Structures are given as C-alpha cells and as structure tokens.
C-alpha cells in the first residue's frame, strides 16, 4: 500500500466516505450483519439469558444449521462473491491512499480480514461438523496439550454456545468496520469545516487590509 503524501481529504481524486468504494465496503458489511441478526433468536438464549434452554430448542438450532449447510452451492458462491466485493472496495480506497485512507481504511481492512478468518475457521468448519454423515454431533472431546494437558468433553449445548459466540464476535468485528468508516466521515466533515473557516478568516483579513490601505491612500 503506497501513501500519496500530496493527497488530502480535499483532493479531487480522494476516495473518502462519500465515494463508491465506501459503498462497496458498507454494503457487504451490513449484509453480513443482517445474516447474523437473523441468527440472534438462537444466539440470545445461549449467551445472554439465564433461563435454561430446552432440548427442543437445541434440536431446532441444529436443524437450522443443517439447513444452512445443505443450501445449494450457488448460495455459498454468492456469499463469497459479496465478501470479494468488500475487498474490492478496500482495494479501491487504498490505491494511492491518503493519510486518512491509511488510518481508517487500513484499520477497517484489518477488521474485515479478521472477520473473514472467523467465518472460514469457525463458522464454515462448524457447519460441516454439525452436518456430519454419522450424525454424531451431540458430544465432542477437545484435547489440549500444554501446562494443563487433558481432555474436555463438550455436549450439544456447549458446542452450539461456541458457535453463537463466534457469531457474536463476528458481529462486533463488522460493527467496528462501520464505526471506523463513520469516524472517517466525521473527520472529513471536521476538516472541511475548519478549512472553510480558515478561508473565511483569510478573506476577511484581506478585505480589512484592502479597506485600511484605501483609507491611507486617501
């Protein structure tokens, strides 16, 4: 990523918060947040409620995930294309980037990459696991090697809770992208206002100097 030191938020070729590239970023992010919001009725009882969940609820959640995993391949391809659209937006904004692009869009890109990593390593992997051909999803043994070596047995509720936690983390990451893009818009707005104020003060100063010079000439 090359930074153009001569480019500012007031430059004609600056791709800021009002550019089409920003739309290519915000659109996919909001789309994925909508998908996560659709799963919130399942995530909330597992993570944010003290009420015990029933076995019927866990079975419904598992059936929902199996249904998503068995969706036609076209659905997954379209989803991955939308992810690519977000990366295209970052590529456009960071080409010959200004300092503003480097700070806000660079940080947004890092969060977007983290979110993509969560999707690939956690969500896709879990969807394949929940739809195992042998149907043995109810229990899993997690092995850990280190200072506290041992095995941990996770039941169905624990495993679904881990998946819900992944959804929640991904949602916070995507909201972080929106916050950074909003911060970029606010920074541009403040810079425009300060520039306009300086130009106004400079114009008034020149006007006063011209008026003073005219009086002395008379």
Image (spheres, helix red, strand yellow):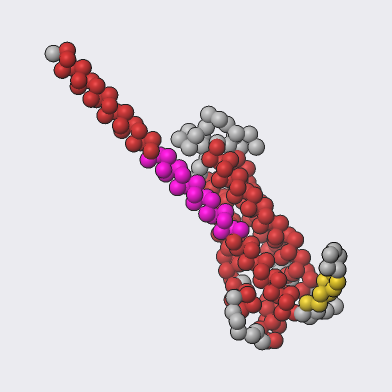
Residue 174 is a magenta residue: yes
**Which quadrant of the structure image shows residue 101?**
top right
Residue at the spot 53% in from the left edge and 29% down from the top edge: 6
Q: Residue 68 in the image: x percent, y percent?
A: 69, 71
Q: Nearer the viewer, residue 98 or 149?
A: 149
Report how many numbered discs are placed on residues in the image: 0
* Residue 188, position as x, y percentages in the image: 45, 42
Question: In what quadrant of the picture does the C terminus appear?
Answer: top left
In the image, residue 48 above or below residue 19? below
Q: Indicate left or right for 151 with 67 as reference.
A: right
81 above or below 127?
above
- Tell me residue 147's x, y (percent): 84, 64
Q: Which x, y percent locates residue 135?
A: 82, 79
Judge from the rendering whether residue 56 lies leftward or rightward of residue 21; answer left or right. Answer: right
Location of residue 3 (image quadrant): top right
Q: Most extreme residue toward the left, as rendered?
A: 218
Write the residue at 70% across / 60% down: 118
* Looking at the image, residue 194 lies above or below residue 149: above
Front-lying residue, 27 or 100: 100
**Boundaries of the magenta span:** 173-193
Query: Magenta region, mostly helix, strand or loop?
Result: helix
Is residue 42 visible from the viewing direction of this image? no
Q: Residue at x 64, y 77 (%)?
A: 46
Residue at point 40%, 39% (across, down): 192
Q: Tell me if 39 is positioned left or right of 182 in this view.
A: right
Classify residue 193 as left or right of residue 115.
left
The quarter of the displayed image where residue 34 is located: bottom right
Residue most extreme to the top? 217
Residue 1, visible in the rendered structure: yes
| Quadrant of the rendering where the N terminus is positioned | top right
């Amino acid at each position: 990523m090359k930074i153009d030191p001569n480019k500012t938020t007031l430059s004609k070729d600056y791709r800021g918060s009002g550019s089409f590239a920003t739309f290519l970023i915000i659109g996919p992010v909001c789309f994925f947040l909508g998908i996560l919001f659709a799963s919130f009725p399942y995530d909330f009882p597992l993570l944010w409620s003290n009420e015990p969940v029933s076995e019927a609820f866990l079975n419904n959640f598992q059936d929902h995930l199996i249904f998503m995993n068995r969706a036609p391949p076209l659905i997954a391809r379209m989803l991955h294309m939308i992810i690519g659209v977000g990366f295209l937006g970052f590529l456009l904004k960071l080409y010959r980037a200004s300092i503003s692009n480097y700070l806000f869009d660079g940080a947004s890109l890092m969060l977007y990459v983290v979110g993509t990593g969560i999707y690939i390593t956690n969500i896709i992997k879990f969807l394949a696991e929940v739809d195992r051909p042998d149907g043995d999803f109810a229990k899993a043994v997690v092995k850990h090697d280190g200072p506290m070596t041992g095995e941990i047995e996770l039941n169905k509720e624990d495993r679904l809770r881990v998946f819900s936690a992944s959804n929640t983390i991904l949602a916070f990451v995507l909201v972080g992208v929106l916050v950074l893009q909003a911060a970029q818009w606010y920074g541009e707005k403040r810079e425009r206002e300060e520039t306009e104020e300086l130009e106004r003060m400079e114009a008034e100063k020149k006007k006063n100097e011209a008026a003073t010079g005219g009086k002395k000439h008379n």
